[in-house]
Image (cartoon, rainbow, N blue to C red):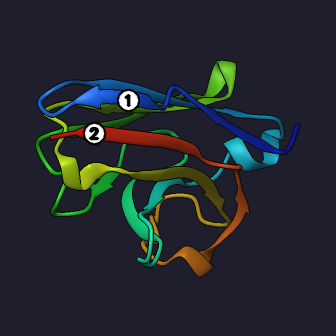
Amino acid sequence: QGRLAESGGGLVQAGGSLTLSCVVAERTDMDKAMGWFRQAPGKEREFVAGASWNGAITRYADSVKGRFTISRNNTVRTLFLQMNSLKFEDTAVYYCAASSKYNYIPDKHDEYSSWGQGTQVTVSP
């Protein structure tokens, strides 16, 4: 198992909900700002949501604001992404990632140094 391990993906109908989890193996990663990215077939990896090292600051892509909620529990080294009102266009492989920042939440994938293997989210129309 790698440093980050996502789970919780699956097939859901449009309008449904899913919660993704990311278990973090290394405390040094959990002490940093973390984020969720996604990549659909033929598209570039895009920022979805991020949380500062303690979760006090969050940041969302415009496309998911009001529908997705990022949270973290540092005690159990887990990052979450609650996804509600899912749309067909949310279909993608979702990745969690750890940056080297604390309160600043990057939205560029090259500012994240540790990545999970990804979990597939498929939303049927």
- Residue occupying the point 61% across, 55% down: 97
Residue reaching furthest to the top: 76
Nearest the eye: 108 or 53: 108
Residue reaching furthest to the front: 125
Mark 2 in CB contact with mark 1 (< 8 angstroms): yes
Give the residue pinned by disc 2.
123
Badge 2 element: strand
Nearest the eye: 54 or 67: 67
- Residue occupying the point 63% across, 52% down: 32
Q: Name which residue type carries label 1.
A: Leu
Give the residue pinned by disc 1.
11
Nearest the eye: 43 or 26: 43
Q: The C terminus lies in which quarter of the figure?
A: top left
Q: Is 104 situated above or below 52?
A: below
Q: Is 10 situated above or below 58?
A: above
Residues packed near mark 1 inside 10 Å, few (<14), some (14 to 19) or many (20 plus): some
Q: Name which residue type carries label 2.
A: Val
Q: Earlier in the sequence, mark 2 or mark 1?
A: 1
Residues packed near mark 2 inside 10 Å, few (<14), some (14 to 19) or many (20 plus): many
Q: Is 83 situated above or below 62?
A: above
Q: Does 99 sit left or right of 86 as displayed? A: right
Point out which mark residue 70 bears: none
Q: Does 16 sit left or right of 33 as displayed? A: left
Q: The N terminus lies in which quarter of the figure?
A: top right
**Residue 118 coordinates in the image, percent (x, y):** 62, 48
Badge 1 element: strand
